[in-house]
């Protein structure tokens, strides 16, 4: 067989890195995070950095960075690591320190872990994130779990690698707000510990490029794919409930989820790594006017920083992939997200506008929100209430066992919320009692 690099010269086909090795893969159940009221919270409502670090230790006792994570093919795993950033314990340790470092923000209150919080599924569980000076962006923070498995980063794919992506939030004006990379370096370069750690990791002084590399090295260790569903796929028929099994069948058939969220033994991630307009932005965006505005703005300043700013803090955010490719067909399109650990990362969609997985199902059941650029794969599904419950049960079976307690608490909380309101439910559309153009 070809080596992984031959399969995809630009970026290795990491998706198949998760090839199941069935019986080999059965790690002991590790600590579950208690996300109770007594979690000590600090700036912006995130768990304190000290607490998060302690929880992380419990979740991930020292990773063996030389070997592929359990169940991953070694060759393909190695191919997902860039040649200039071989994974070493020193680099992972440095990246871990930087990930929780609030001095990398202009007002000293924000680190990566503020928005990608260990105790909240490595997201902030807010609709949109809060950065320095309590500023809110337009996008929902995705999890940093399993990001090594994605082929592009950010919901519009505007960053090509983890090493590149990790530098962006530091200089984004509403996230960490540093004036530039040099300012980020100045913030920590007098610290002896950092001086020594950068030398140990990269043999160089503190610098901005290596900051990105180290954080990416740390993120490559955040592999959390050991879900009940994965054990089910590997042959353990009792790993998921009979309701979830029915949901799995619906996922592949009547509900058509699999067309964009492929899931099978060799590729259990749940993303096609492509971009689709499923009609989330369409609820509130005037696409044509926005697209014109975006083209003008990007012509004036085509830099990646400008793009990052526009995507995070203006109405143009809703254009999604279009901002990167300028293709009309990409208007309102976002990358299909990984469905791993989906139970513990609400709210959902790029703008965090969807509160529960029941609401997600209501959105799909009515065929999304009609708009000119809607993906052809979106159609009313005519799923009954029981069927919706079954797909939701399946989705909750995709969470890593280490978060099992959090996952069942989320299930209960979302179920209660869904009992109170189902704002996206539209049976007339779902069952085609009415057609989209009649609206
Ligand atoms: C103020 C909150 C905030 C901070 C601070 C922050 N992020 Fe994010 N992060 C987000 C949001 C919001 C997105 C989605 C942005 C987008 O897609 O346009 C995101 C996206 C990402 C992604 C892409 C995930 C995917 O599915 O494509 C990664 C990886 C990531 N952040 C890592 C980091 C790292 C590393 C840091 C620290 C250097 C960091 N983030 C700091 C809010 C934040
Ligand atoms: C046409 C492609 C397509 C189909 C079909 C599809 N999805 Fe999605 N899915 C996406 C895209 C793209 C997004 C992100 C949209 C956004 O953020 O605006 C998404 C988002 C989601 C999310 C939210 C993820 C998050 O982290 O916020 C869930 C859950 C989800 N889909 C589950 C499903 C289920 C269940 C089905 C079947 C009923 C399904 N999807 C069908 C493409 C698709």
Image (spheres, rainbow, N blue to C red):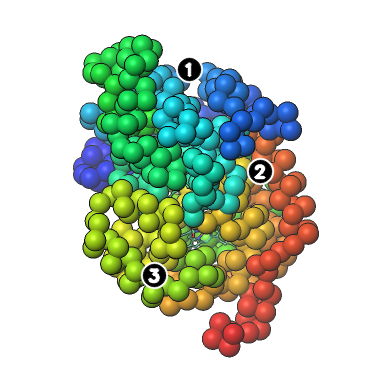
- Few, some or many residues within 10 Å of mark 2 (<14, 14–19, 20+): many
Label 3: few (<14), some (14–19) or many (≥20) C-alpha neighbours in 10 Å: some
Report the residue at 67% width, 27% height from top: 40
Residue 98 x %, y %: 42, 26
Query: How much space separates mark 3 and mark 1, taking CA atoms?
Result: 47 Å
**Residue picked out by circle 1:** 62
Disc 2 designates what residue? 240
Contact between labelled residues 3 and 2, with CB atoms less than 8 Å apart:
no
Q: Where 235 sits versus 260, above or below? A: above
Residue occupying the point 27% across, 61% down = 298
- Picture layout, residue 205 above or below residue 23: above
Please give left or right for residue 189 compared with residue 372 in the image. left
Mark drawn on residue 385:
none
Residue 260 drawn above or below residue 383:
above
Can residue 201 be seen? no
- Secondary structure under tag 1 reads loop
Residue 438 position in % (x across, y down): 58, 88
Nearer-N-terminus badge (2/3): 2
Name the image quarter holding the C terminus: bottom right
Label 2 secondary element: loop
Respond yes or no on whether mark 3 lies under 8 Å from ligand 2.
no
Q: Are marks 3 and 1 in contact (CB under 8 Å)?
A: no
- The residue tagged with tag 3: helix, strand or loop? helix
Label 1: how many residues lie within 10 Å, few (<14), some (14-19) or many (20+)? Answer: few
Q: Are marks 2 and 1 in contact (CB under 8 Å)?
A: no
Residue 315 as seen in the image, left or right of residue 120? left
Whole-percent x and y of residue 244?
Answer: 66, 50
- Residue 392, percent from left and from top: 65, 54
Asked if 388 appears above or below 57 in the picture, the reply is below
Q: Which residue is mark 3?
A: 290
N-terminal label among 3 and 1: 1
Residue 430 in which image quadrant = bottom right
């Amino acid at each position: 067989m070809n080596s992984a690099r031959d399969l995809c010269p630009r970026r290795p086909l990491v998706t198949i890195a998760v090839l199941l090795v069935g019986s080999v893969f059965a790690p002991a159940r590790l600590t579950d995070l208690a996300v109770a009221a007594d979690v000590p919270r600090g700036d912006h409502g995130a768990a304190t950095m000290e607490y998060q670090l302690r929880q992380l230790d419990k979740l991930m006792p020292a990773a063996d960075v030389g070997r592929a994570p359990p169940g991953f093919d070694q060759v393909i795993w190695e191919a997902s690591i860039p040649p200039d950033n071989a994974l070493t314990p020193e680099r992972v340790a440095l990246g871990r320190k930087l990930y929780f470092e609030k001095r990398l923000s202009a007002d000293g209150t924000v680190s990566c872990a503020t928005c990608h919080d260990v105790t909240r599924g490595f997201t902030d569980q807010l609709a949109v994130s809060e950065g320095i000076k309590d500023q809110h962006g337009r996008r929902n923070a995705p999890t940093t779990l399993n990001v090594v498995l994605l082929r592009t980063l950010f919901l519009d794919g505007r960053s090509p690698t983890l090493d590149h992506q990790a530098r962006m939030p530091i200089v984004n004006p509403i996230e960490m707000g540093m004036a530039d990379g040099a300012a980020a370096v100045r913030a920590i370069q007098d610290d002896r510990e950092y001086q020594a750690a950068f030398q140990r990791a990269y043999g160089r002084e503190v610098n901005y490029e290596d900051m990105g590399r180290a954080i990416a090295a740390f993120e490559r260790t955040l592999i959390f794919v050991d879900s009940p569903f994965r054990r089910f796929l590997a042959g353990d028929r009792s790993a998921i409930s009979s309701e979830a099994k029915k949901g799995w069948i619906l996922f592949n058939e009547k509900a058509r989820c699999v067309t964009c969220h492929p899931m099978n033994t060799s590729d259990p991630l749940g993303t096609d790594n492509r971009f689709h307009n499923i009609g989330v932005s369409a609820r509130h965006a005037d696409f044509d006017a926005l697209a014109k505005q975006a083209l003008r703005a990007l012509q004036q300043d085509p830099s990646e920083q400008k793009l990052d700013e526009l995507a995070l803090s203006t109405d143009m955010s809703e254009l999604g992939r279009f901002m990167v490719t300028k293709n009309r067909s990409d208007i309102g399109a976002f990358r299909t997200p990984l469905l791993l650990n989906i139970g513990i990362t609400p709210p959902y969609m790029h703008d965090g506008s969807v509160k529960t997985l029941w609401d997600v199902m209501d959105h799909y059941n009515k065929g999304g929100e009609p708009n000119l650029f809607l993906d052809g794969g979106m159609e009313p599904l005519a799923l009954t209430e029981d069927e919706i419950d079954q797909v939701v049960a399946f989705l909750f079976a995709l969470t890593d066992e280490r978060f099992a307690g959090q996952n069942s608490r989320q299930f209960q909380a979302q179920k209660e919320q869904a009992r109170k309101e189902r704002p996206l439910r539209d049976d007339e559309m779902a069952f085609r009692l009415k057609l989209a153009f009649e609206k």
